[in-house]
């Protein structure tokens, strides 16, 4: 069934933002595979990987302003896709929970190992070198400034940062502490350190320092 789920998911990413495109989904899948390999508990891989392929199917609609919450819309749409593919009801419900729980700004906590793994894999793709690239790609689409020296992170009271560098401080550097699994925490540590070093160098260069 996974091949069918993947093929049903892919068309939703036509004209997607580079920050949330099909390549992002594929990276999350590879990260999920890595995390599963390091697990010492039973994982329903059908649930996990169905959720991986489907977790961002609503993202393009949200970016266009057509829906308010891509996770909630995506969970409902995923349920229909899985019913069309004759998935068991409990499998569909488990996948829907994973999708609802993966979003950073939602108040839905992962309640299953599969939901924890999807959340960790998705957040890991927002950390490190890839995460930095995604921040500046998406910020450019929104027309946000890279950096404003008159608006340091501690003075920025916007939800996710009014500049791209502030977004790095306000969101990206919080991801390490949102990991649910031990393998996720281990991978997040090195990626977090990379982002810290990047932000520090960015600020030095922006100030005209070496």
Image (spheres, rainbow, N blue to C red):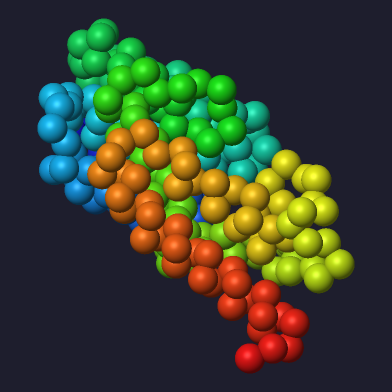
Query: Which image quarter: residue 167?
Result: bottom right
Number of marks in picture = 0
Tell me if 20 is positioned left or right of 163 in this view.
Answer: left
The outermost residue toward the bottom is 210
Whether residue 33 sits left or right of residue 160 in the image: it is left
Name above or below for residue 84 compared with residue 50.
above
Residue 196 lies, in percent from the top left, at 53, 65
The percent position of residue 168, horizontal first and vertical second, equals: 60, 58
Name the image quarter holding the C terminus: bottom right
Q: Position of residue 70 (x, y in %)?
A: 54, 32
Residue 127 higher or lower than 208, as above or below: above
Find the residue positioned furthest to the top.
89
Q: Nearer the viewer, residue 36 or 71?
A: 36
Q: Residue at x 63, y 56 (%)?
A: 169
Question: Is residue 189 in sight in this rendering?
Answer: yes
Depth check: 145 or 161 in front? 161
Residue ID at (50%, 64%): 195
Residue 75 located left or right of residue 206: left
| Image position of 70 (left or right of 38) | right
The quarter holding residue 93 reads top left
Vertical position of residue 133 compared to residue 56: above or below: below
- Image quadrant in which the N terminus is located: top left
Is any atom of residue 9 visible in this view? no
Which residue appears at 16% of the width and 43% of the height?
Answer: 38
Residue at image position (59%, 33%) is 105
**Nearer to us in this view, 133 or 202:** 202
Which is more toward the observer, 148 or 98? Answer: 148
Q: Position of residue 148 (x, y in %)?
A: 80, 68
């Amino acid at each position: 069934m996974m091949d069918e789920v993947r093929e049903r998911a892919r068309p939703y990413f036509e004209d997607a933002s580079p920050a949330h495109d099909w390549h992002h989904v594929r990276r999350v899948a590879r990260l999920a595979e890595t995390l599963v390999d390091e697990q010492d508990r039973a994982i329903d891989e059908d649930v996990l990987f169905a959720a991986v392929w489907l977790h961002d199917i609503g993202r393009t609609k949200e970016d266009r302003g057509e829906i308010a919450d891509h996770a909630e819309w995506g969970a409902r749409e995923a349920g229909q896709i899985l019913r069309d593919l004759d998935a068991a009801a409990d499998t569909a419900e488990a996948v829907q929970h994973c999708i609802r729980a993966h979003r950073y700004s939602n108040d839905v906590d992962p309640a299953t190992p599969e939901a924890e793994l999807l959340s960790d894999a998705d957040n890991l793709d927002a950390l490190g070198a890839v995460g930095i690239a995604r921040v500046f790609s998406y910020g450019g689409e929104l027309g946000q400034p890279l950096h404003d020296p008159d608006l340091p992170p501690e003075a920025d009271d916007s939800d996710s940062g009014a500049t791209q560098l502030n977004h790095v401080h306000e969101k990206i550097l919080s991801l390490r502490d949102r990991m649910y699994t031990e393998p996720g925490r281990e991978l997040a540590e090195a990626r977090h350190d990379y982002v810290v070093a990047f932000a520090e160098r960015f600020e030095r260069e922006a100030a005209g320092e070496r």
